[in-house]
Amino acid sequence: MSTPLLSIIVIAYDMPRQALNTLISLSPAYQDGVAADDYEVILVENRSRRNMDAAAIAALPGNFHYFLRDEPGVSPAAAINFGFAQARGRFIGLMIDGARMVTPGVVHNVLMAFSLNADAMVAVPGYHLGENEQQFHLTHGYTEEKEQALLDEIDWQRNGYGLFDISCLSGANPNGIFHPFMECNCLFTSAEVFREIGQADERFDLPGGGALNLCIYRKIAMHPRTRSFMLAGEGSFHQLHGGVTTSEVVKRDDILRRQSDQLTELLGQPFRSPTVEPILLGKIPGPALRYLKHSIERGMHRMQRCAERNEDMYADERAKERLREERQA
């Protein structure tokens, strides 16, 4: 078997139905314009009361590698680093939350980005299935059964872009693609850059990793060599599964406060979203146009606000450009 160019690392815990949907959406039977040998998918599952069906994973077309681990902690950080150690690709994808299905053009466009720039950071915008963000699922009577009915209604395996029709924007990017992202749950970079940022910091030991995902995204975005690419017409869609911050849990505000405090401590400074300017890549399918319209409207508001304050919309991008110029001088 030839060495794949891209290794996609998916982390799962106590979500067998959702994680299998994610894997199906990453298979070459679903992804457009790619061959099975182009990439591999490494699924690392931390053992729970509901583990995945290894036979169902083995039956999927493509290069899937399944690892079931006994993780003593409550964070996915160690599992990410374990998955990275198994990866053979020059480039990697990180899906820390294995309950995120993707649209059919993700892998093709990711590979295109890396063909343009080997130091690309490729971000896939995030959405939640359902009309409302899933941390309000109890309030709105949204259940896994209703979600499955929505997926069946659009026949998602044959109509992947129909996911846009049954979703809403994630709170990590509520203003769309022309505002800085807090995080990205479907993120791609080179294996070299991931090593250089120290991989996944295992000091993030809170349930679900706490704010680990925000830290990884910021470090990659702020790496002096990376160039941001945004797949504006693709998406990563979160499925309801009782996640730490993506479900309506008691004392959610307290959980978020603890995560923020740990993030500040480990970063050594208060967190802010990196203002890197993305290169937009890929097609915009019809169902995604309403989100592009929303992004443009919110982006124009941001542009006006920055102009009034004499602020650069993409100050971090300019700083990275100056740093690159200084290093080349």
Image (cartoon, helix red, strand yellow):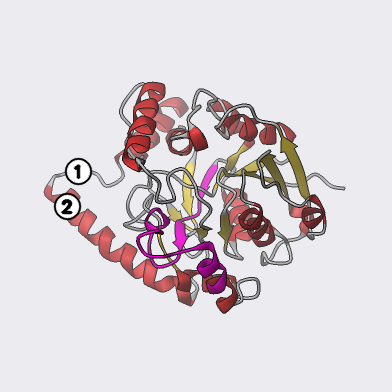
Q: Tell me if residue 225 can be seen.
A: no
Residue that numbered label 1 is attached to: 311
Looking at the rendered structure, the secondary structure element under dot 2 is: helix
Q: Residue furthest left?
A: 308
Front one among 101 and 292: 101
The one nearer the camera, 139 or 90, is: 139
Quarter the C terminus occupies:
top left
What range of the chain is rendered magenta? 120-149
Q: Nearer the viewer, mark 2 or mark 1?
A: 2
Depth check: give the residue in front, 105 or 206: 206
Is disc 1 surrounded by few (<14), some (14 to 19) or many (20+) residues within 10 Å? few
9 lies left or right of 240 = right
Answer few, some or many: residues within 10 Å of disc 2's Cα (few below 14, many 20 plus, some between 14 and 19): few
Q: Circle 1 — which element?
A: loop
Residue tagged 2: 305
Instruction: Judge from the rendering whether residue 283 lies leftward or rightward of residue 307; answer left or right.
Output: right
Whole-percent x, y for residue 72 in the image: 63, 27
Magenta-drawn stretch contains 139: yes
Quick check: marks 2 and 1 in contact, CB under 8 Å?
yes
